[in-house]
Amino acid sequence: MNYLAHLHLAEDSDDALVGNLLGDFVKGRPERLDYPDAIRRGILLHRRVDSFTDRHPVFRTSRARLGAPYRRFAGIIIDLAYDHFLARDWADYHDEPLPSFAARTYRALARHHHRLPPRLQRMAPVMSEQDWLSAYRELDNIERSLAGIARRLSRPTPLPWAGEQLRLHYAGLEADFNAFMPDLEAFARAERRRLRADLLAK
């Protein structure tokens, strides 16, 4: 899953928001990292959510919808597509309005700036300034994100043109997302409880 989905699934705290983003930026076992417990739990939740997503048959169906040239990058494309549907229909999934939630996330990243890996330190201010999380509501911005990812990769990719695939398969991907999210949210709720129980048991 991409940034917005991981943030949506986080515990309701600034530390947890940061931790759920850090999952893409830190390596190693979280219990060995010098972070508060809620950040460690967020990193672990992020990794478990990614594993659950990659194995889920609906997510695999979404990946298979894309044309052959895009299959190698299907995970990236579908992650962003799902963030688009989540942002577009945010009120169906979250009580806090998206602009408020996004602003709270950016403030949390700013407060924890000293804890962030260098790449996220560079990215977080840009994310805030351009309001990436709210921007996901528009498919044009998803296309721009895919083009930006392509620029950061060392080899040429078809990602700048993947928006055509998203528009072609929009209805099917939307149906996939709607089928997948209840399973993902139930999994994340269970994992949040499990992670808190594991911490209390130590």
Image: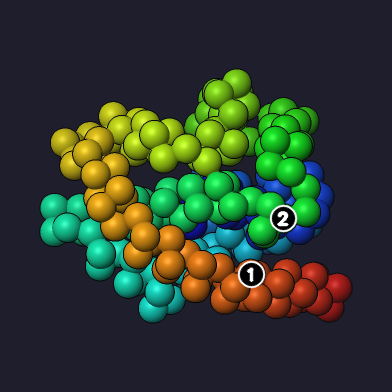
Q: Residues within 10 Å of mark 2 (few under 14, many from 20)?
A: few
In the picture provided, is 107 more to the left or to the right than 77? right
Left-right relation of 99 to 122: right
Q: CA distance from mark 2 to mark 1?
A: 11 Å
Number of the label disc, if any, that sits on residue 145: none
Asked where in the image residue 101 lies, by quadrant, the reply is top right
The structure residue drawn at horizontal position 81% and vertical position 50%, both measured from the top left corner, is 13
Q: Residue 115 lies in what quarter of the image?
A: top right
Rendered image quadrant of residue 144: top left
Q: Is 186 rendered above or below residue 38?
A: below
Task: Evaluate whether residue 33 shows in this view.
Answer: no
Q: In this orientation, which residue lies closer to the viewer: 200 or 155?
A: 155
Q: Residue at x 31, y 50 (%)?
A: 166
Percent across and percent down for residue 110 are: 72, 28
* Residue hosting label 2: 94
Mark 1, other Cα within 10 Å: few <14 / some 14–19 / many ≥20: some
> Looking at the picture, how far across and down is residue 199, in whole percent?
80, 70
Provide the residue designation for mark 1.
Answer: 185
Element type at mark 1: helix
Colour convention of the picture: rainbow
- Amino acid type, label 2: His
Near-viewer residue (176 or 26): 176
